[in-house]
Amino acid sequence: MFEPAGGRWLRFSKYDLHRTEDGRAYLRPAPEAEFEWYDPWEAFRESRRARGKMLAPYHDLLRIAEEIEPLSAGTGEPLLDPNGRKLVLEPGNYHRLLKWCSEHGLLGLLLHRVESLTLSYQWRRAPDKHPLAADWSRNGLWPVRAAYFRINGSWVHRQIILDARLFPQRGDDGQVIAADAIPEQLPKPGISIRGPIGLSQRRWDQAYEEQQVHQYQPFKKTWDAYFPELIVPDDLSNPDAYPYPLPTSRAFWKSYAEPVDEFLLTAWVFQDALAELSGELHLADEAKRRLLDSKQSLNDFLFGAFPTVQLSEEGEIQQQWTSPSLMGHYALMALQDLTAPGRRQFWCLNCGGLVVGGHPKAEYCTDRCRNTAKMRRKRANEDPIQPGSEL
């Protein structure tokens, strides 16, 4: 069992659907929407206190995965994933997604994967009294790397001083250093990022062989895909030197958007992983392989979770686990439910939805489903047999 977990997340009061010229659909905050920080773990703790009468908040994402299915044909609106495979989404489901986002916020898929950003390299004036100025500067200037780093869940801006002797040519004060002039041993402007989250064991092994588990990428390969309205000025000498906002800042969240296809694919993988983990280890080989794949998928969702030091109201030091994304928070909640003693996984007899960490004697996900099934049985028992009807 984990120590108490927590952490805050951001949600806007309203979200819109945005389409780019290539037809890709995005979930993004509405221009007039207001935002607030909230604690998703408060609902989880409340579900524990409810003793089976209330589901943990990640079950709302499982319901999205169960209600919105990729269809092979129909009248639904076509949806394109990054690989160009067509998914069919019923028009009414967009409203369902937007409503979910206004209640919970976006999943934070980009923040779950990214660990650092290198913004640019520039020549800056070296302070005369700095102890490294004599050796590291050239004609009073030295190169400075501007970067963002994620440190225990918080994003910080750092200006890193570099040795001017690594750079063959000196520029003017404030001049951006072109990418082709950056030494090979230093990271180019871009992001340090892991592969797509929720990878199965086989896909993880394949990604590892192809060196895609962790890599350094230019901004335009992945980062810019989450900012569909980003316009980099043409007059920049180095387009990668665009001043991207600090992750988790207000400016970041106002322009951040998540592709609908990635949102849904993540929900489906998460739901499949939890459904398979409800199985048994003594199953046949194929079922066991799926179980091990699901284990790896959940581990991947848990990536980036870390312990923090918190103080209780009484001033006592506490250990608290948190995550860089809402998706990571949900995985932590699911893991606590999966490993809680005396709880089990089952499918609701009324709606068919998956329940993780349910009461050992429960058959329905909520009181609403239990009452619906009860009323259905009551109507069936009260329905009289009409004269002349066939038995």
Image (spheres, rainbow, N blue to C red):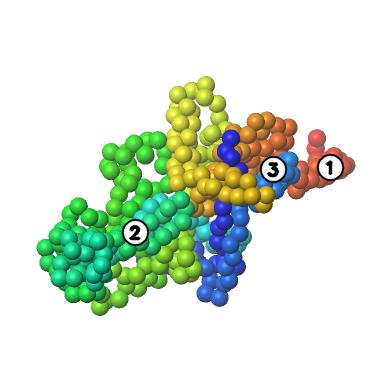
Q: Secondary structure at mark 3?
A: helix
Question: Can you give x and y, in whole percent of width and height, for residue 80 in the image?
Answer: 41, 58
- Circle 2 — which element? strand
Furthest residue in direction left, as rendered:
168
Residue 9: quadrant of the picture: bottom right
| Tag of residue 48 | 3
**Residue lying at 37% horizontally and 39% vertically, measured from the top left:** 203
Locate residue 339, reporting x and y percent: 59, 33
Residue 43 appears in the picture as rendered: no
Looking at the image, is mark 1 or mark 2 nearer the viewer? 2
The correct choice, above or below, for 354 with respect to 159 in the image is: above
Do labels 3 and 2 touch, CB within 8 Å?
no
Residue visible at 29% across and 53% down in the picture: 216
Number of marks in picture: 3
At label 2, counting other C-alpha atoms closer than 10 Å, the crowd grade (few under 14, some 14-19, many 20 or more) is: many
Q: CA distance from mark 1 to mark 2?
A: 61 Å
Residue 117, label in figure: 2
Q: Earlier in the sequence, mark 1 or mark 2?
A: 2
Q: Look at label 1 and name its amino acid.
A: Lys
1 and 3 marks in contact (CB < 8 Å): no
Q: Is residue 391 visible?
A: yes
In the displayed structure, 382 sits above or below 229; it is: above
The alpha-carbon separation of the residues under discs 3 and 2 comes to 38 Å
**Number of residues whose C-alpha sits closer than 10 Å to that of mark 1, classed few (under 14), some (14–19) or many (20 or more):** few
Does residue 18 sit above or below 93 in this rendering? below
The quadrant in which the N terminus is found is top right
